[in-house]
Amino acid sequence: MLDKGFLDKLKGIVGDENCRTDTAERYCYAFDGGIHRAMPDAVVRPQTTQQISDMVKLANEYKVPIIPRGAGTALCGHSVAISGGVSVDLQGMNKIKEIHVEDLYVVVEPGVIYDQLNAALAEKKFFFPPDPGSAEACTIGGMAACNASGMRAIKYGATREYVLGLEVVMPTGEIVEMGSRTIKDSSGYQFAKFMLGSEGTLGIITEITLRVIPKPKKNAVAVAAFNKLEEAGQGVSNIIGYPVLPSGIELMDDVCIKAVNQATNLGLPEVEALLLIEVDGHPEAVKEDIEKVAEICKSSGATSVEYTDDEKRKVELRKGRKSMIPALSRYKPEWAAVILADDMAVPISKIPQTVKAFHEIADKHGIIVATYGHAADGNLHTKVLMDPLDPEHWKHGEQATAEIFEAVHNVGGTTTGEHGTGITKAPYMRAERKSLIEFMKKIKRTLDPNNIMNPNKMMDWEEGIITHLRYPVNIGGGTDPKNPEGKKSGGSD
Amino acid sequence: METKALDKYKKEMVTCTLCGFCKSVCPVFEHKGWDSSVARGRILLAYGLLTGEIEADDSVVDRIFHCPTCNDCYRRCPSKIKTVEIVEAARKDLRAAGLSLPKHETMIKNILEYGNPYGETENRLEKLDLKPHPAKLGYFIGCTSAYRVETNKAVISILEKLGEDFTILDEVCCGSPMKRVGGSDDEQLQVVNHNLDEIKKLGIENLIFTCAGCFKMFKLDYPELIGELGFKPMHFLEYLAEKDLKFKPYPHKVTYHDPCHLGRHAGVYDAPRKILEKIPEIEFQEMEKNREFATCCGGGGGLRIAFPETSGEIAGERIKNAEFAEVITTPCPFCVVNLNTGKELVGSKIEVKDMIELIDELLE
């Protein structure tokens, strides 16, 4: 419960109409796209950087946690108010402030939606490439805070490759400008880059300057079917090593293929692995590259390869990939796709053995792990299919998740490629980055002495992951499903 | 609070991945901006009611009822969560617990007492001076057409020009307004059974509608309540699209608004376009968002009566999308009424034209 004096002052800063403490709002902001939930004590929608700065100073005075939030599409509890406090919804700060394609940059507020920015840039034949799966809903501020990326990372990189400058309200309320508007910048510490991936623990991003690039003129898509996962993996390595630099290679394992066939009439070949490969660029280069991709796939063992640059056919070929998530979520009547181990990255050549290891771990625990992902950059996405209302499934899900990340770390992989850490991946990031955890904590304590900025996340999350669950299931030692507040005690330490 | 209606959607709500893609299409979210004002939020609130995690206080009731049931969220949902069904189930449970909105309660009371949501006391057939007779083709007038606009005259005129033997019936409200805002099965069955008896009495085989809400109710909700209908509900435009119609020229730039309950809910997209194509000299242009992607007029789901401000803002936005045209036409009288509200709000010069009236004016 917030101190009345604090709440009155908070309303004074953002305005009554931009501050809510009712049940409906607090409950809806208790969730993001992941498995955890905990209610904030208030939700605010600030309109200016100055309001945010004033609010953060006030929160320091009263030691109230502040949880920055974009569209709430994160998958690991990043914006879940695990210690209560004020959820700061930045969706209302959604202006594209400046577009300067001739200087290769744009300046935006944090609440601008990725797709809306690209729609504005498309008019000038430019784009901001990272292309996360949540492109139509996620915000640029959230992408920067989590260093998000997507299908095109192999060729175009992640958000960090495009952030030139940031304006940030630091945990003690100062407004700091980081980076610049220039393509090159060696002036001092590269703090704008440092903030990427901080997930709201080191400040609130209030303005982003992004590098943008011209849109490729054409693209083409190939679909290749492989009887052996290893052959698909070899195909990916052969394409990249040739070298052809695709704009994306998507992998679907046999579980994903079965799920799509079960849910649609697409009739995908029932093989161990499918690759969906996209190339883009100058029309002549695209033609040459896609033909070469098809040839490499065949020589790598593909049983069938189809490729096209026809717009209609490209849409049809992408249908399988697009229908996969709904197909998986309804794979078995009482099961659902649960966000547990979902976003690891491994060296590209290790993909086949890693996927096989996932299947063995799933079989051992009586759950299903469906794997797809951005094969060209080694970033795998898994959907754990289980009954989210069965406590036994959660216990096995947790054990399987630990084993999956152990397998990932054993081949030199990392815990998260593009979704971030939050709560759900915290134990595995801690296991992976042992030498870094204390250093991260020191930085956090220095910049945020009252520990108010999205506290108890990443390196500071010391519990397991099967806790504070959003599902109505009571697991021994877990959250009482009748406790909607679901809070961890204390916001400041 | 008991959650009898929501119980059957437990798995559906757990299956929602909370991806938030519904934010890109929800017309209420576009105007409100808070996370409780979008399908994902409504599903969470319904889920909180089901699990008992939250109390149904005023804020929860407000958000659950703040939805036009336009179904664009379902269209966009990657997991195909039955969002509108969940919202309607939540409303049913809230209402059973005595937590309805006063304006909706009055509407339901009016339907049960007077046979229409407006509380009009005059029998619609006496008002319109019409008498039923046995015929294979029936016309279900609908409450808005009977009491608020004059679409009925256009329908009758068109059918007479075509030389059809048709009948109206001694109808009462189809029940759609009740169903959308949480009317119980018993309440719905009172009007459903009355209408079905009248249809049976007259030997109707094909029943035509102009109101998208009435049509959706008969086509999709009546079978849910009582099983097979024994007659075929058709939207009037589906009926007309199959006819050899000859029109006078109409040299105007026209666009078409797809009513949500006719388009996304009932799947009727081609018939209106097929008819508009037949009009000489018409300059027809689609709005950017059309067919299954069409945005809502904001009138449905009990939104217009309970939250006129939100409903009007949504209608105004739809009008702004159409301003490249001289005329925006749509066959649903309820959409016509709400789009006119939007037109006034944004001060647009566009003409909002009932498509049935347009057809009648141009039909030779």
Image: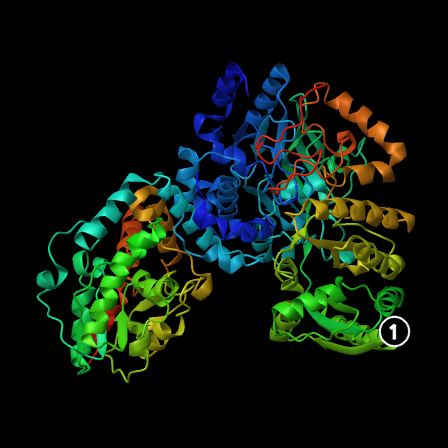
Q: Looking at numbered disc 1 in the image, what kind of residue is underneath it? A: Ser
Q: Is residue A345 left or right of residue B134?
A: right
Write the residue at 85% across / 28% down.
A439
Residue B67: image location, x then y, percent: 40, 48
* Coloring basis for residues: rainbow
* Chain assignment, label 1: A
Quarter residue A58 falls in: top right
Do we see residue A424 in this rendering?
yes
Do we see residue A181 in this rendering?
no
Q: Relative to residue A26, is residue A337 depicted above or below?
A: below
Q: Relative to residue A340, is residue B352 depicted above or below?
A: below
Image quadrant where one finds the N terminus of chain B: top left
Q: Is residue B234 left or right of residue A338?
A: left
Total number of numbered discs in the rendering? 1
Residue B205: image location, x then y, percent: 27, 78
Per the image, label 1 sits on a secondary structure element best described as loop
Q: Relative to residue B264, is residue A184 depicted above or below?
A: above
Quick one: A469 or B316, which is closer to the camera?
Answer: A469
Image quadrant where one finds the C terminus of chain B: bottom left
Q: Is residue B294 left or right of residue A108?
A: left
**Number of residues whose C-alpha sits closer than 10 Å to that of mark 1, classed few (under 14), some (14–19) or many (20 or more):** many
Write the residue at 50% across / 60% down.
B75
Quick one: B323 or B146, which is closer to the camera?
Answer: B146
Residue A144: image location, x then y, percent: 69, 41
Q: Which residue is mark 1?
A: A300
Write the residue at 18% across / 60% down.
B146
Quarter residue B356 falls in: bottom left
Residue B233: image location, x then y, percent: 31, 72
